[in-house]
Image: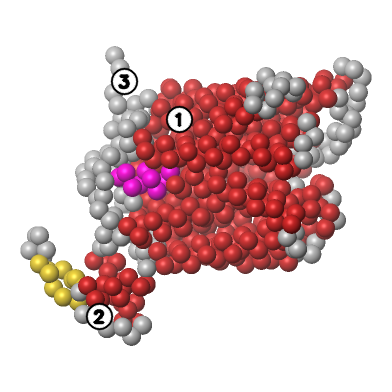
Amino acid sequence: MSKPELTLTRSPSHDPNFEKGKHHVVQCSLLRSIFIVVTCTAAMVVNTSNAASVSISLPTIEKDLDIDEEQLQWLVSSYSLSSGCLLLFFGRLADLYGRKKAFMIGTLCQVAFSLGCGFAQNGLTLAVLCGFLGIGTAATIPSALGILAHSFPPSRARSIAFATFSAGAPVGGAFGMMIGGVLTEFSSTHWSSVFYLTAGISALTGLTGMISFDADVPSTEIVKRVDWIGALLITVGLVLIVFVLGQGELASQGWKTPYIIALLIAGVIMVSLFLLWERYLEQVQDDPSRAPSAWMPPPLMRPSIWTRARGRMAVILVIAFLNWSAFMSWCFWVQLYYQNYLLLPPVKTMIRFIPMFIVGCLCNIFVAMVVARLPLVVFVVSGTLLTASAGILFALIDPSATYWAFGFPSTVLVVFGADFVYSSGTIFIAKIALHHEQSVAGALFQTMTQLGIAFGLTITTIVFNTVVKKESADPGVTVNSAGTNTPQSAQLKGYKSAQWTSASFALIAALLAVLFLRSVGIVGDKKTIKHTDSDQTKMYYARRCLDSGIAVYPTSKQGPTGNTRRNFTPLVKSTVDRFR
């Protein structure tokens, strides 16, 4: 007997896990809707381009600032560390105090610290400022996800909005690599130009957000306090775990180094305490017999969020974790294969990655077109299997073969998993998350992808180093710390083993999807929606007119239910449109 399909609608009464299947109208005009999507997508472009542009500028930065190679990797790691570990905290702040406020604060941080990075005169200052730059991203990304979910109720427009937002990842990666390389090589300020450009784009993003985003509405929660204890536990715990994952293989004694073991244990304890504390706070909040207490704020993240949609929420989060482990591990080792094994220059390496970015954009267009027709499991299973195929192709690669035999098809296939899972996954999460926790839900999804990246790179690095050491020992070669005397045969074997490991992550994700997501059904929505400004939005712009000394003459209009509502004359509405 076939398994019954899980319908993604909220019951009208008490079930908070799903949205009601009622008609919605987007309360903003078509032009403002476009600006909202473009602004949120630009935030994602800035997020991914930051890491890509800095990565391609590292050799120049190393030379100009005389930075040690061990310190150099912290320019990228510090950004990823702060942006990944603060997502939940800023997601909660955005839901509680306003997503527009959080977005604007995030873009302001990006502008300020990007300019600071451009003027940095030494490696330590640059690494610290890159870490602060990541704080801006941690505020903008969950806020953008919450703004999209709030601005676009379940509809075809929501599918398009989230797919466009997801397309910002490949576009940002391509933009960062290409523009970063060009500016670093040809501009007078070299690598500093990359940060100046980021500051300019962030400022423009903040300006369009200020104009297009609706004013923040008060949170529907009764108790509006921040769980500072939970925020401290999860932030410190994630920082320690991500730090250990990045440093474990680089430490003097590897994973046996005492401080690596101690920090890993401390990080796991902190995260465990966070989960226990959040569970306790959730029980307190749900118990009406308990009196309110200043020491018992609402939880930063309700642990029950993982059980939404009969546990499918947890499944999609784990799949995102594994899929991004596979995807970013593939990218990392392919880049090293081209530059360290085939000895290709960075520009030629960059060119070989271009198909990935083009296909990534096409994938998101495809998702927007058919997400309302195909079930979630189709996107997740097909995407993860194609990503696994890309890893397998590189695991079987023949270095003497042309790029078109192994490299090109692998580059085309690998991005399907990242974009299919991200686009359909964020639509699914926005559908089952409550209105007041949209940013937290988006932050949780983004956090899992960031942790997946750190986990995937760590595991594949361990596999690579183990295989290289073993293969080099057979002919009697002891690999030095820099790896410069590694035999080519051992190096190739290490790259292939790392890709087999990468493919296994994606295959496990596909298996989980087949087992647990078959009954989810369609997460998109076929219905179209009317783009019109709500009366609340019109009155908001009318107040801005009055504040600017412009006369507004509202008239009365009888609504279809007999209620009188406020309306604007065409002349006044044309004046109000100036503010959009």
Which of the image's four quarters has the C terminus? Answer: bottom left
- The residue shown at (30%, 60%) is 29
Location of residue 507 in the rendering, given as x and y in whole percent from the top left corner:
54, 23
Main SS of residues in magenta: helix
Please give left or right for residue 546 compared with residue 344 in the image: left
Q: Residue furthest bottom?
A: 549
CB within 8 Å, label 1 to label 2: no
Q: CA distance from mark 2 to mark 3?
A: 59 Å
**Where does label 2 land, which residue?**
552
Please give left or right for residue 556 compared with residue 337 in the image: left
* Secondary element at tag 2: loop
**Where does label 3 land, which residue?**
3
In the image, which is nearer the foreground, mark 1 or mark 2? 2
Q: Residue furthest left?
A: 562
- Residue 500's place in the image compared with 124, above or below, is above
First-in-chain label (1 vs 2): 1
Q: Amino acid at mark 3?
A: Lys
Please give left or right for residue 421 compared with residue 518 in the image: right
* Secondary element at tag 3: loop
| CA neighbours of label 3 inside 10 A, class few (<14), some (14 to 19), many (20+) | few
The magenta span reads 155-163
